[in-house]
Image (spheres, rainbow, N blue to C red):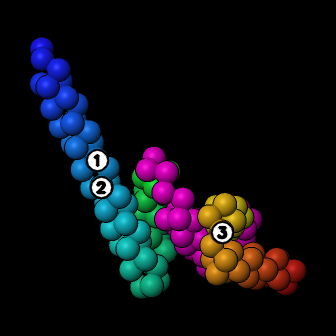
């Protein structure tokens, strides 16, 4: 095979993979949005598996910013369901990612959420 054909084949494969990755990113975002809608409607049991799916996809895509948002949302759902230990775990994971990314407002949000959980544990 000529080197030009190899280059074209490699380029086409890279293009195909990048398109697939973009579709996966969009699919993960859509899952998160769908989960958020369920959460807003108070249908936490419907939101939870969707957030978990989106979390798994974002981990594979290594999208730390979106991961931190999903982890935070999972913490909120678990807090609403009175699963305080799980909520704290998710908020802690979100906080660590947000520190890595230096997302100051999001760090503040994570710390605030954790503070609420600590306060609820005392009641």
What is the magenta segment's predominant secondary structure? Answer: helix
Q: Start and end of the magenta stretch? A: 60-89
Say which of marks 3 and 2 sits in front. 3
x%, y% of residue 106?
63, 77
The residue under label 2 is 22
Residue 71 among those drawn in magenta: yes
User: Is there CB contact under 8 Å for labels 3 and 1?
Assistant: no
Q: Name the residue rendered at 49%, 65% in the picture.
A: 66
- How far apart, in angstroms, are the residues tagged by discs 3 and 1? 27 Å
- Dot placed on the residue nearer the N-terminal end, 3 or 1: 1
Q: Is residue 102 visible?
A: yes
Looking at the image, residue 100 lies above or below residue 78 = above
Q: Residues within 10 Å of mark 2 (few under 14, many from 20)?
A: few
Q: Residues within 10 Å of mark 3 (few under 14, many from 20)?
A: few
Name the mark on residue 102. Answer: 3
Element at badge 3? loop
Name the mark on residue 4. Answer: none
Quadrant in which the C terminus appears = bottom right
x%, y% of residue 37?
38, 80
Residue 62 among those drawn in magenta: yes
Element at badge 2? helix
Q: Name the residue rendered at 31%, 60% in the picture.
A: 27
Q: Name the residue rendered at 19%, 29% in the picture.
A: 7
User: Is there CB contact under 8 Å for labels 2 and 1?
Assistant: yes
The residue under label 1 is 18
Element at badge 1? helix
């Amino acid at each position: 095979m000529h080197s030009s054909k190899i280059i074209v084949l490699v380029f086409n494969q890279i293009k195909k993979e990048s398109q697939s990755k973009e579709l996966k990113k969009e699919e993960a975002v859509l899952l998160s949005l769908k989960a958020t809608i369920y959460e807003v409607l108070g249908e936490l049991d419907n939101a939870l598996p969707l957030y978990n799916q989106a979390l798994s996809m974002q981990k594979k895509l290594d999208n730390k910013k979106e991961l931190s948002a999903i982890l935070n949302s999972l913490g909120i759902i678990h807090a609403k369901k009175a699963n305080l230990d799980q909520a704290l775990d998710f908020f802690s994971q979100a906080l660590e990612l947000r520190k890595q990314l230096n997302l100051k407002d999001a760090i503040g949000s994570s710390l605030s959420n954790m503070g609420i959980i600590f306060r609820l544990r005392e009641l």
